[in-house]
Image (tube, helix red, strand yellow):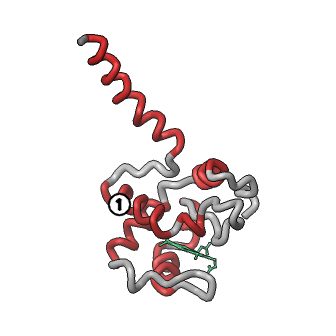
Amino acid sequence: MNYLLYTSLSLLLLAPAQFAQTAPGKPVTEAEKAGQKLFFQRCSVCHMGTYPAYKLYGPPLYSDVIRTKGDDAVRTKILDGSPTMPAWKYTFKPADVDKIIAFMKTMTKEDVVRESLARGNAEAEEP
Ligand code: HEC
């Protein structure tokens, strides 16, 4: 009984640590966590490692990139898209876009590269 309890307790303690090692970004707030989910559903296919099918299609997105561009420019790009990026204004409410932006600000370049490498994209460092 004690053994079982101990085992389940240590599993509980270990699981988040293992997750933290591989999951990119460090979402803390509910908004950042919701943004992470949306990002992985809708954005990571182009903005994180996708090798061997093709190299990173869109540029890597992480805190420095978002802060340099500024929230407004990033929001406009997400809503309107471009010839090579889909527009999301028919998909997302403005609040969802803000959550994705909040999540992207939790990622470092290393997070994106590590996740891309984990997905088998050895060229992630030179997208
Ligand atoms: C079909 C592939 C594709 C998907 C899916 C996609 N993007 Fe993009 N994205 C691109 C490409 C290609 C570019 C570079 C060309 C451009 O800026 O229009 C880009 C550029 C961007 C930029 C500008 C980055 C910079 O440095 O200028 C942002 C911000 C961005 N995407 C956010 C997102 C978000 C957030 C999502 C998910 C909601 C998303 N993208 C989904 C392909 C995609």
Task: Classify the position of ligand 1 by quadrant: top left, top right, bottom left or bottom right.
Answer: bottom right
List x then y, in percent, for residue 55. 71, 65
Residue 1 versus residue 65 in the image, above or below: above
Which residue occupies 35% across, 71% down?
A: 96
Label 1 neighbour load within 10 Å: few <14, some 14-19, many 20+: some
List x then y, in percent, for residue 117. 66, 50
State left or right for residue 2 relative to residue 35: left
State left or right for residue 8 relative to residue 124: left
Nearer the observer, 62 or 85: 85
Which residue occupies 58% across, 50% down?
A: 111
Q: Is the distance from the Cβ of mark 1 to the nearest ligand 1 atom less than 8 Å?
A: no
Nearer the observer, 12 or 107: 12
Which residue has dot 1 on it? 34
State which quadrant residue 16 falls in.
Answer: top left
Nearer the observer, 67 or 114: 114
Q: Is residue 109 visible?
A: no
Kind of element beneath mark 1: helix
Disc 1 marks which amino acid? Ala
Which residue occupies 62% across, 48% down?
A: 118
List x then y, in percent, for residue 5. 27, 18
Q: Quadrant of the C terminus?
A: bottom right
List x then y, in percent, for residue 79. 45, 83
